[in-house]
Amino acid sequence: MPEQFDVVVVGAGPAGSAAALVAARGGLSVCLLERGPFAGSKNMYGGVTYARILDDLIPHWWEEAPVQRWITRRSTMVATPTQAVTLDVRADAWSKAPFNGATTLRSEFDAWLASRAVEAGAVLVTSTTAVGLLRDARGAVVGVRTDRPDGDLAAKVVVACDGVNSFLAKEAGLYANFSSEHFTLGAKEVLTLGRDEIDRRFGLVDRQGLDIEMIGVTRGIPGGGFLYTNLDTVAVGVVVNVDALAASGVRPEELIAGVKAHPGIAPYLRGAELSEYSAHLIPEGGYDAMPDLVTDGMMVAGDAGGFCLAAGLFLEGVNFAIGSGRAAAETAIAAIAKGDTSRSGLSEYRRKIDATFVMADHKRMRRAPELILSERMQRQYADLICDVAQDLFTVTNPNPKPGLRKLLRTERKRHGVGFRSLVRDGITSWRTFG
Amino acid sequence: MATVEFRVAPDAHIVVDSDVCASCTTKACVSACPARLFVPTAEGGILFNYEECFECGTCYMVCNSEGAITWQYPLGGHGVVLRSS
């Protein structure tokens, strides 16, 4: 007889640990499986955690969560190889509780959240990979098979938080519309620069941090670049569409080198030393590419469920992981109490996330991935914005200033940006972000 | 040189069917793999190592030949260990 739990959560990332925490607090017996030697050991990300979803789960989480820096400065940079136009937002409020975003190292943050789940009563089992689903005669999921000898674990409910490659969701048949076009590759270098040097170069004090998002730095491969300040390191990298990357024949590390060499970035990084290079896939398809989230005896949360908001202005994932894991656990508690863990018994999960930011943000921005990764946005608009800005601030004496309207018309024509597509994308943008 | 720790598992978690690769014209895995694990051979096949894999999954996603790359998670406790990301 396999060991029996109310809930087996697969994967101790933010989704899994939040699910385990909530389920354990709800009085359920919980096993939290992690294939790495510790929670967070397999995880990397762009770099910013927005953790307000923890406010009521872990009051004053900001006093104990392992944070590198609090993001008080957020820049969105539109670039060509020789130009950059940056919107730079600073807000004092973001450096005070309850804060806004924070840079964290996943080896620290994920391990911390998992430890809170353990304190709540969940049993964390590390260095153990879930290799398949256990099913009953009707096909309902009743547990997982692990790679430990006699390692079957029976569960009334399985919560699959096994990440972007979720083999469990695939095995359960939930990834019917799976397509590589909905995935991006994130590759990044963590560079050591020293705390004081980072403060000086980026205009920061105390534990203030900067987040720079870039578009137009990936050689026309749909995606973007990023730079995040940790306490004494800086993370620099790219996120690019997997199919387009493959078709281009360009290596991801070449793209990172391009970002590092960009005239708008290079001076920040002079003398920095490589500390860690890594890569990870990201489910960026958004609302329309999401898998089915529920089957008999199982729910899917976090990256496995496609919960990752990649909407240009907004790049969030950890918060959606926590929100979805939490909703899955609340659903499991109610379903187990009622004695119905079938697909219909667990369907409350979908209603819960529909009613919160977890699905609402994805739904509102369902057109964002296509828009942001479009050729027009990636190349034409980036070029257009940079050229118009450069023209605007170039003093052309003895000729008089041409005026913005004329500049726009000239550059729009030069870059082949049709008036109609500009209006159409404007409307889509307004619907997405307005 | 690797900047992260790899606890190499006894068995490969990546399986490549080099016969299929021989007929592949794109070999997208070669350039797309962020860990540079795939190397084309003179005979038209693919040589690979699994030891320094980031476990991202890009290779099987970009592989255009059914069954050429089979990929699963390594044995629990093995594979890449990230600390500063």
Image (cartoon, grey):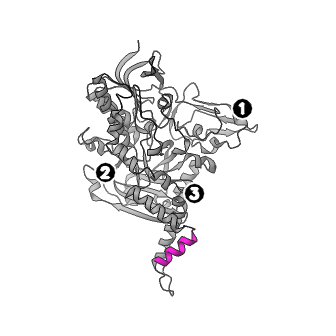
Magenta residues, as a range? A405-415
Q: In the rendered image, which quarter is residue A198 located in?
A: bottom left
Q: In the rendered image, which quarter is residue A118 located in?
A: top left
- Of the two numbered discs 2 and 1 in the rendering, the one whose residue sits closer to the viewer: 1
Mark 2 → mark 1, Cα distance in angstroms = 52 Å
Question: Do pointers 2 and 1 mark residues of a single chain?
Answer: no
Chain on which label 3 sits: A
Q: Which mark is residue A100?
A: 2
Residue B20 image offset from top left, x and y in percent: 70, 33
Q: Is residue A74 above or below residue A144?
A: below
Q: Is residue A212 left or right of residue A340?
A: right
Q: Secondary structure at mark 3?
A: loop
In front here: A98 or A304? A304
Q: Is residue A192 left or right of residue A121?
A: right
Residue A283 image offset from top left, x and y in percent: 47, 43
Are the residues tagged 3 and 1 within 8 Å (C-beta)?
A: no
Mark 3 → mark 1, Cα distance in angstroms = 33 Å
Residue A108 image offset from top left, x and y in percent: 37, 39
Q: Which mark is residue A106?
A: none
Type of the residue with mark 3: Gly
Can residue A16 be seen in this snapshot? yes
